């Protein structure tokens, strides 16, 4: 059975559900059921609270320089999202006014329906309209995502370490434009 999904801009009323979705997707992707990165529990708890807590999500949604699109199923449950905004990757060529794809996540149960492509298109089209380079950071072990981004014109231009508490993930910096 094919599910129908609706994509729309996120708004303030979405904060609890979006925070829960962000946390769920992070755990599903990088936890035991996904890449199984062995984050120390204390580091993971700090990161999850600071990155996916309701206060953080509310702040992002209230910031007019950020955009978040969400996909919801027929029951109204959020199943995927794309978050973009001003570039902040640590690269010497990253300049004020450049854009960044911060996050693109789907629940595993929503994958394969074209949602990822649609959300990615929305985010990249929004950033491209600014006429500036677009940046992103991607975990070096996520070959599938790297392939998708390369297919959209992104190239690896650097590396950095992304902090999850005191744990450091090795990430590639990719740029388009």
Image (cartoon, grey):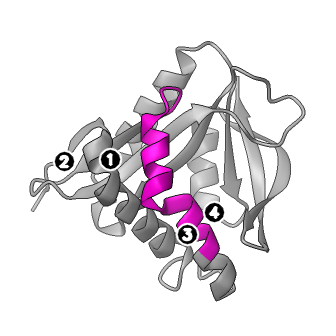
Question: Residue 68: x, y in percent?
Answer: 41, 39
Residue 39 seen in render: no
Q: Quadrant of the C terminus?
A: top right
Q: CA distance from mark 2 to mark 4?
A: 26 Å
Q: Is residue 60 left or right of residue 72?
A: right
What residue is rendered at 45% in x and 67% in y? 23
Magenta-highlighted residues: 46-67
Q: Which is more foreground, mark 4 or mark 3?
A: 3
| Residue at mark 2 | 5
Earlier sequence position, callout 4 versus callout 3: 3
Decide which of 10, 123 is in the foreground and name it.
10
Residue 142 - label:
4
> Does the magenta portion include 60?
yes
State whether residue 88 is above or below residue 47.
Answer: above
| Residue at mark 1 | 115
Q: Are marks 4 and 3 in contact (CB under 8 Å)?
A: no
State whether residue 81 is above or below residue 26.
Answer: above
What residue is rendered at 58% in x and 45% in y? 102
Earlier sequence position, callout 2 versus callout 1: 2
Q: Are marks 2 and 4 in contact (CB under 8 Å)?
A: no
Earlier sequence position, callout 1 versus callout 3: 3
Q: CA distance from mark 1 to mark 3?
A: 24 Å
| Residue at mark 3 | 48
Q: Quadrant of residue 151?
A: top right
Helix or strand or loop: what does disc 4 sit on? loop
Q: Residues within 10 Å of mark 1 (few under 14, many from 20)?
A: many
Q: Are marks 1 and 3 in contact (CB under 8 Å)?
A: no
Q: Are marks 2 and 1 in contact (CB under 8 Å)?
A: yes
Question: Residue 85: x, y in percent?
Answer: 57, 33
Helix or strand or loop: what does disc 1 sit on? helix
């Amino acid at each position: 059975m094919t599910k129908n999904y609706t994509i729309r801009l996120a708004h303030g009323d979405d904060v609890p559900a979006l925070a829960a979705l962000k946390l769920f997707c992070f755990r599903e992707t990088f936890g035991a059921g996904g890449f199984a990165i062995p984050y120390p529990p204390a580091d993971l708890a700090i990161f999850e609270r600071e990155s996916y807590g309701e206060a953080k999500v509310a702040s992002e949604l209230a910031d007019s320089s950020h955009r978040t699109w969400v996909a919801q199923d027929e029951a109204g449950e959020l199943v995927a999202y794309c978050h973009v905004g001003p570039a902040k990757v640590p690269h010497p060529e990253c300049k004020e006014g450049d854009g960044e794809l911060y996050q693109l996540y789907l629940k595993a149960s929503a994958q394969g329906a074209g949602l990822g492509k649609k959300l990615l298109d929305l985010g990249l089209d929004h950033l491209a309209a600014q006429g500036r380079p677009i940046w992103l950071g991607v975990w070096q072990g996520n070959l599938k995502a790297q392939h998708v981004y390369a297919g959209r014109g992104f190239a690896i231009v650097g590396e950095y370490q992304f902090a999850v508490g005191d744990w450091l993930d090795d990430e590639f910096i990719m740029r388009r434009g």
